[in-house]
Image (cartoon, rainbow, N blue to C red):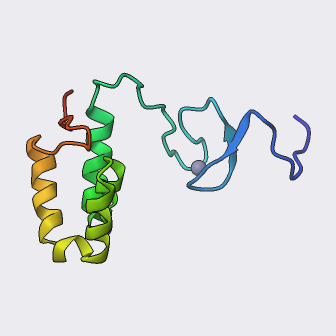
């Protein structure tokens, strides 16, 4: 292997966690262990979206991020400015997501198992 310089080869990306150059095809960063496994693209497999929505609601729910993520842009903006309805709205959303009652802007339920 030749010594690498500042140019980024086409088949490599910078790890968004540790900043090291890793292969685009790597499913996991060898430096920090961050997973890069691609989410399945089938529209009816809701599991990756469920987890993402759940985590976004939990960590960034007061900014309405889970609402933006699921297409509810207007509600997302309202939650952003009200800090998730003072947190209460976010808790309700979180419970809805956990219980499978949460839907995206197309009315498709976001469930743990599609
Ligand atoms: Zn990394």
Residue drawn at x 28%, y 24% as measured from the top left = 44
Question: Is residue 3 found left or right of 59 in the rendered image?
Answer: right
Residue 31: where, in percent of width, then height? 61, 47
Looking at the image, residue 30 sits to the left or right of residue 55; the answer is: right
Q: In which quarter of the image is residue 10?
A: top right
Give the percent coordinates (x, y) of residue 35. Answer: 48, 40
Pick out the residue farthest to the front: 74
**Residue at 29% across / 55% down in the picture?**
67
Q: Quadrant of residue 79?
A: bottom left
19 or 82, nearer to the observer = 82
Considering only vertical position in the picture, is 42 above or below 11? above
Q: Residue at x 30, y 76 (%)?
A: 81
Q: Position of residue 51 (x, y in %)?
A: 28, 43
- 11 is higher (above) or lower (below) than 94: above
With respect to residue 6, does 88 lie above or below? below
Position of the N terminus, as image quadrant, is: top right
Q: Which image quarter holds the C terminus?
A: top left
- Viewer-proximal residue among 66 and 82: 82
x, y percent for residue 76: 30, 62
Location of residue 113 by image quarter = top left
* Of the pair 33 and 7, the residue shown nearer to us: 7
Is residue 110 rendered to the left or right of residue 5?
left
């Amino acid at each position: 292997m030749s010594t690498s310089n500042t140019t980024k080869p086409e088949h490599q990306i910078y790890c968004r966690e540790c900043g090291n150059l890793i292969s685009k095809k790597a499913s996991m960063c060898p430096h920090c262990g961050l997973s890069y496994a691609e989410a399945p693209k089938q529209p009816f497999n809701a599991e990756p979206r469920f987890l993402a929505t759940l985590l976004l609601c939990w960590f960034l729910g007061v900014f309405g991020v889970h609402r933006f993520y699921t297409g509810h842009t207007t509600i997302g903006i309202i939650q952003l400015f009200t800090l998730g309805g003072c947190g209460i709205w976010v808790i309700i959303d979180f419970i809805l997501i956990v219980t499978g009652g949460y839907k995206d802007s197309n009315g498709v339920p976001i469930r743990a198992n599609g």
